[in-house]
Image (cartoon, rainbow, N blue to C red):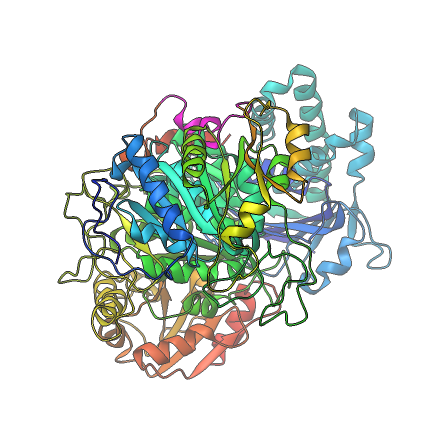
C-alpha cells in the first residue's frame, strides 16, 4: 500500500492506493526521493504535472499526490511538451522506464531535446523489461540471457547519455538508486535547470535482472569529481563513452539554449497559460488580410 | 463555329508544375470576381515540384455554381504535352488557346506563344500575365480595370514590374480579343455588383477560419498532402490570432503533443491525411479513454499506402469511424461547402471540448484545393468558450455523473488535482482492474451515455428539394439521393440539371453518430434511396444501413482518384 507516510509530505497520496511494484523494487526509493525533492522545493501539488508512458516505472505518478497524465507506451515526451506549451507555469516531470523512453519513444527523445521544452525526464533504467516479464530492453548488456533472447542479447545497448550530449541537451546526468542522497541532489538540480533535463537512474530489477543488482552498480560505478567543468561538452562526451566503471553525476549542464515556450511568439507579451486565454482573433481583419 | 456564351464558361489552364498556372488562375479569378462574375476554381495536379502536367479549372457563371464540370469550353495550354491529359474533356465546341499540339490538331488552336511575347517584354516570368490577358480579352472583360488590379497587386514590387505586367496583360488582351472576333465568340454574362465585395477562399482556408473562430490555441501536425494547407494557414495567422502552431517530427508526436496540450487546457487541432492518421490511431484510443478533447482534420486522398497523393476520394470514413482499439464515442463531420467547413470545424472543436471526445472533420483533395467565392457576412461568431472549471480540493477528474460527462479541470487551475490515465481508472483517475465495478461504469460513461448526448446535438442532414419556378419546393420527392462531404454541390447541380422533379438531395454533414429516429423520419416516405460516394465500397451507405436501418437501392460510386463531375452524375441520375 502507498499513501500512509509517517513523515508529513504534501506529495503523499492521502487515500490508500494499492501499489503494483514488487517488494524490493528500485522504484520505491525513486518515488520517495522525488517526493522529498518536491517537498523541499516548497512546490504545491497543483503546480506539478507528471507524465509517463507504460511500464512499471510509468506507474509512479499513480503513487504521488500531483497532477498526472499516464498515457501511451513511449509517448510521454510529446505529451509533456504539449502540457508545457499549454501551461509553462507547470513544473513538468516525466518518469518512465528505459524501454519506454529509449525504446518505444526513442524518436521522441531525439526531437524533444531539439525542441527543448523546460521539462525534467527521469528514466528508471533497470536494463530490462519488468512489466512484460524479463525481456531485453534497449539498455540490456550484450550477451544477457532472457526468455526471448535465450542465446543472449545480440544487439548493442543504447548510450542515452552520449546521445543526449550529442544533441546538446541542457542538462544530462546519471545517478544510482543505491545512493538515495546523491540521487536526490541530482534530481533537485535537474528540476531547477531550465530546459530539457535528462536524469538516467541506475535501478535494479530484483525479479528479472540478476546481473545489474545493487551490488553490481556499487562495483561498476564511480562519481565524477565535483570540480569538473560541466559546460565542457567534449569532456562530457568522453565521460559518457566510458564503460567500466560507469560515471555518475552531472555530465553536462549549460544555459545556452532558449526553451520551446520561450521561443514561440505566443508567450512573448502575455504569460498567461492557454486555458486562461480566449481567441483574440479579429476574424474580419484576418479575412480581409487573407484576400491580399 | 459561333460561340455565344451567356451563362456558364469552364476554362482549363494546363501546363507543367512550376510554370505558374496558379498565378494565372489567381489573376483571372480575382479580376473576374471584381468585375462581378461568379467564379469557382478547382485544381488538379501531380506529385511533382517541377514538370508533370497540372491544371486549374475555372468556372465563370452568371449565377453561383460551385461544382465541377468536366466539359472544357476554353482550353489554355502553357505546354503542348497537356493535350493528351485532357482530351477526354474536350467536345466539338471546345476552344483552344496557347501552345499547339501538332499531333492533336492542326488548325483548332489559336497559337499564342505566351513565352516569346513575355520575353519581348522583359522575361519569361511575364508569360502568366500574357495568358491571363488573353483569356480576359477573349471573354471581353474590362481591360482598364484589369490593369488597375495589376497595379495594386504588384504595388510592393515597384514601378517597373507594374508597367511590364500591364504591358503583358494588354498584349495578351489584344490577342484574345482578336481570337474572339475571328471565331465569333461572344461572352455576354450578367454580372452582379454585390459579388465584388465577396471573398475568395479555398476549402482548407474555410476549415482554418473555423478553427480560429472556435479559439484554437494549438495546432500541431506533420505535413501531408492534401491536409497541409491547414497547418500553413494557421501558422500564417498564428501571431495575429494567438495560437501556437508547431510542425511535428511525425504524426505520433503530433497527436500526443496535442493531447498533452488539451489536457492542460488548450483547444487543439491536428491535421493529416489517411496515411498519417494511421499512425495516430493509438492516440485516438487514448483520447477516448482519458476523455480529453481533440479535433482531427483529415484531408482524404486515395490509398492504400501512398496511393495517389495529389488526387481525391472519400475512402477514409471507415478508418476514422473505427480508428483506435476499444469502444468509446466520437463524432465525425464532413462539410460540403466553405460555410459548412467554417461552421462545422468550429462545432467539432466545441463538441470535442464540451463532451471530452475526439472529433473529426473529413475533407478531401477536391474540397481543400477548390477556390470558392463566399460572402463576408456569412462568417458568424462561433462558440469559443472553453468548457473548463476551476477545481476544488475534492475534485475527481472522472466523477460519475447523471449524463456521463465529468467536469473538466486542468492542472494549476484551482485546488484540485487532475489525473488522467490510459489504464482503466477510478473516479480519481487511478489505475484499477476492477472488472465488475467501476470499469462497467466508466465504459458506460464513455460509450452509451456519450452517445445519447451526441445524438441529442446531432447536425441533421440538409434536405435539398428541387427548385421550381417559384423557388424551392417544400415537399421531398420520392427518390432520395444521399451524399456526404465534398460531393454536395455537384450532386445538387446534377439533380437540378437532370430535371428529375421527384428527386431530393439529402446531404449529410454529420456522419456519426446518427440519431436513428430523426434519420428514419427523413427517409420515411422514400421509395428509392441512392447514395453517391467517391469510393469503391459505399462506406457511408453501409453505415446508414447499419446505424439507421435504411435500405439502400443503389449506389453511384467513383474511385479513380477524380472528383465527380456534373455531367456524369446527370447521366446516371437520368437512369434512375
Q: Residue at x 52, y 23 (%)?
A: A255
Q: How many labels does the image show?
A: 0
Q: Is residue A200 left or right of residue B415?
A: right
Q: Does residue A261 show up magenta in the picture?
A: yes
Q: Residue at x 57, y 24 (%)?
A: B148
The image position of residue B326, as x and y in percent, is: 38, 70
The image position of residue B335, as x and y in percent, is: 40, 56
Whether residue B61 appears in this view of the structure is no
Q: Residue at x 24, y 41 (%)?
A: B385
The image position of residue A166, as x and y in percent, is: 65, 36
Whether residue B450 appears in this view of the structure is yes
Q: Give the range drawn in magenta.
A: A255-269
Q: Is residue B534 above or below residue B173?
A: below
- Camera-nearest residue between B387 and A4: A4
- Camera-nearest residue between A253 and A288: A253
The image position of residue A169, as x and y in percent, is: 56, 33
Amino acid at each position: 500500500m502507498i499513501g500512509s507516510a509517517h513523515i508529513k509530505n504534501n506529495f503523499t497520496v492521502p487515500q490508500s492506493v494499492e501499489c503494483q511494484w514488487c517488494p524490493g523494487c528500485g522504484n520505491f526509493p525513486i518515488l520517495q526521493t522525488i517526493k522529498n525533492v518536491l517537498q523541499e522545493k516548497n512546490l504545491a501539488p497543483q503546480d506539478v504535472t507528471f507524465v509517463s508512458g507504460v511500464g512499471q516505472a510509468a506507474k509512479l505518478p499513480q503513487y504521488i499526490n500531483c497532477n498526472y497524465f499516464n498515457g501511451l507506451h513511449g509517448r510521454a515526451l510529446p505529451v509533456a511538451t504539449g502540457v508545457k506549451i499549454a501551461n509553462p507555469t507547470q513544473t513538468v516531470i516525466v518518469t518512465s522506464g528505459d524501454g519506454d523512453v529509449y525504446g518505444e519513444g526513442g524518436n521522441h527523445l531525439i526531437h524533444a531535446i531539439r525542441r527543448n521544452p523546460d521539462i525534467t525526464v527521469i528514466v528508471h533504467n533497470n536494463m530490462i523489461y519488468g512489466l512484460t516479464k524479463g525481456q531485453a530492453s534497449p539498455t540490456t548488456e550484450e550477451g544477457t540471457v532472457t526468455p526471448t533472447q535465450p542465446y543472449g542479447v545480440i544487439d548493442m545497448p543504447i548510450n542515452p547519455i552520449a546521445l543526449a550530449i550529442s544533441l546538446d541537451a541542457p542538462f544530462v546526468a546519471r545517478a544510482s538508486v543505491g545512493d538515495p542522497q546523491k540521487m536526490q541532489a541530482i534530481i533537485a538540480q535537474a528540476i531547477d535547470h531550465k530546459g530539457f533535463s535528462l536524469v538516467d537512474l541506475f535501478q535494479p530489477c530484483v525479479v528479472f535482472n540478476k546481473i545489474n543488482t545493487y551490488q553490481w552498480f556499487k562495483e561498476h560505478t564511480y562519481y565524477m569529481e565535483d570540480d569538473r567543468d560541466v559546460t565542457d561538452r567534449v569532456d562530457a562526451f568522453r565521460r559518457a563513452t566510458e564503460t567500466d566503471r560507469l560515471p555518475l553525476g552531472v555530465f553536462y549542464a549549460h544555459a545556452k539554449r532558449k526553451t520551446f515556450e520561450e521561443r514561440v511568439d505566443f508567450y512573448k507579451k502575455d504569460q498567461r497559460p492557454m486555458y486562461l486565454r480566449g481567441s483574440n482573433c479579429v476574424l474580419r481583419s484576418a479575412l480581409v488580410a487573407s484576400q491580399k | 463555329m459561333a460561340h455565344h456564351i451567356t451563362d456558364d464558361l469552364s476554362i482549363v489552364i494546363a501546363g507543367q508544375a512550376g510554370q505558374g498556372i496558379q498565378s494565372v488562375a489567381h489573376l483571372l479569378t480575382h479580376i473576374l470576381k471584381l468585375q462581378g462574375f461568379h467564379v469557382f476554381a478547382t485544381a488538379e495536379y501531380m506529385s511533382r515540384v517541377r514538370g508533370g502536367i497540372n491544371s486549374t479549372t475555372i468556372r465563370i457563371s452568371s449565377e453561383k455554381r460551385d461544382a465541377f464540370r468536366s466539359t472544357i469550353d476554353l482550353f489554355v495550354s502553357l505546354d503542348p504535352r497537356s493535350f493528351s491529359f485532357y482530351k477526354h474533356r474536350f467536345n466539338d465546341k471546345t476552344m483552344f488557346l496557347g501552345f499547339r499540339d501538332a499531333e492533336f490538331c492542326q488548325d483548332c488552336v489559336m497559337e499564342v506563344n505566351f513565352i516569346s511575347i513575355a520575353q519581348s517584354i522583359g522575361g519569361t516570368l511575364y508569360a502568366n500575365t500574357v495568358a491571363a490577358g488573353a483569356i480576359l480579352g477573349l471573354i471581353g472583360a474590362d481591360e482598364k480595370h484589369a490593369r488597375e488590379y495589376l497595379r495594386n497587386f504588384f504595388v510592393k514590387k515597384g514601378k517597373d514590374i507594374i508597367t511590364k505586367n500591364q504591358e503583358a496583360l494588354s498584349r495578351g488582351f489584344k490577342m484574345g480579343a482578336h481570337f474572339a472576333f475571328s471565331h465569333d465568340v461572344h461572352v455576354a454574362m450578367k454580372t452582379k455588383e454585390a459579388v465584388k465585395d465577396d471573398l475568395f477562399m479555398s476549402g482548407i482556408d474555410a476549415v482554418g477560419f473555423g478553427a480560429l473562430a472556435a479559439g484554437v490555441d494549438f495546432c500541431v501536425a506533420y505535413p501531408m498532402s492534401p491536409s497541409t494547407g491547414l497547418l500553413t494557414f494557421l501558422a500564417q495567422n498564428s501571431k495575429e490570432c494567438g495560437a501556437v502552431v508547431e510542425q511535428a517530427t511525425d504524426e505520433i508526436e503530433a497527436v500526443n503533443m496535442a493531447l498533452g496540450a488539451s489536457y492542460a487546457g488548450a483547444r487543439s487541432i491536428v491535421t493529416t491525411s489517411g496515411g498519417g492518421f494511421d499512425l495516430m490511431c493509438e492516440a485516438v484510443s487514448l483520447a477516448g479513454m482519458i476523455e480529453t478533447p481533440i479535433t482531427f482534420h483529415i484531408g482524404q486522398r486515395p490509398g492504400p499506402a501512398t496511393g495517389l497523393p495529389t488526387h481525391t476520394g472519400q475512402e477514409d470514413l471507415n478508418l476514422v469511424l473505427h480508428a483506435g482499439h476499444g469502444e468509446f464515442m466520437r463524432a465525425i463531420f464532413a462539410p460540403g461547402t466553405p460555410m459548412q467547413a467554417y461552421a462545422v470545424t468550429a462545432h467539432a472543436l466545441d463538441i470535442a471540448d464540451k463532451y471530452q471526445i475526439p472529433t473529426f472533420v473529413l475533407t478531401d483533395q477536391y474540397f481543400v484545393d477548390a477556390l470558392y467565392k463566399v460572402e463576408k457576412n456569412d462568417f458568424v461568431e462561433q462558440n469559443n468558450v472553453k468548457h473548463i472549471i476551476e477545481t476544488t480540493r475534492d475534485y475527481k477528474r472522472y466523477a460519475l455523473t447523471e449524463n456521463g460527462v465529468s467536469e473538466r479541470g486542468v492542472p494549476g487551475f484551482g485546488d484540485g488535482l487532475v489525473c488522467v490515465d490510459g489504464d482503466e481508472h477510478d473516479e480519481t483517475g487511478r489505475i484499477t482492474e476492477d472488472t465488475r465495478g467501476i470499469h462497467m461504469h466508466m465504459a458506460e460513461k464513455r460509450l452509451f451515455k456519450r452517445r445519447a448526448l451526441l445524438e441529442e446535438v446531432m447536425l441533421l442532414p440538409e434536405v435539398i428539394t428541387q427548385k421550381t419556378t417559384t423557388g424551392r419546393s417544400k415537399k421531398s420527392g420520392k427518390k432520395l439521393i444521399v451524399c456526404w462531404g465534398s460531393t454536395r454541390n455537384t450532386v445538387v447541380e446534377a439533380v437540378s440539371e437532370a430535371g428529375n422533379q421527384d428527386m431530393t438531395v439529402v446531404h449529410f454533414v454529420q456522419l456519426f453518430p446518427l440519431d436513428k429516429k430523426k434519420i428514419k423520419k427523413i427517409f420515411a416516405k422514400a421509395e428509392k434511396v441512392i447514395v453517391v460516394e467517391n469510393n469503391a465500397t459505399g462506406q457511408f451507405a453501409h453505415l446508414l444501413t447499419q446505424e439507421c436501418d435504411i435500405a439502400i437501392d443503389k449506389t453511384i460510386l467513383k474511385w479513380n482518384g477524380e472528383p465527380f463531375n456534373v455531367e456524369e452524375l446527370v447521366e446516371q441520375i437520368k437512369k434512375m
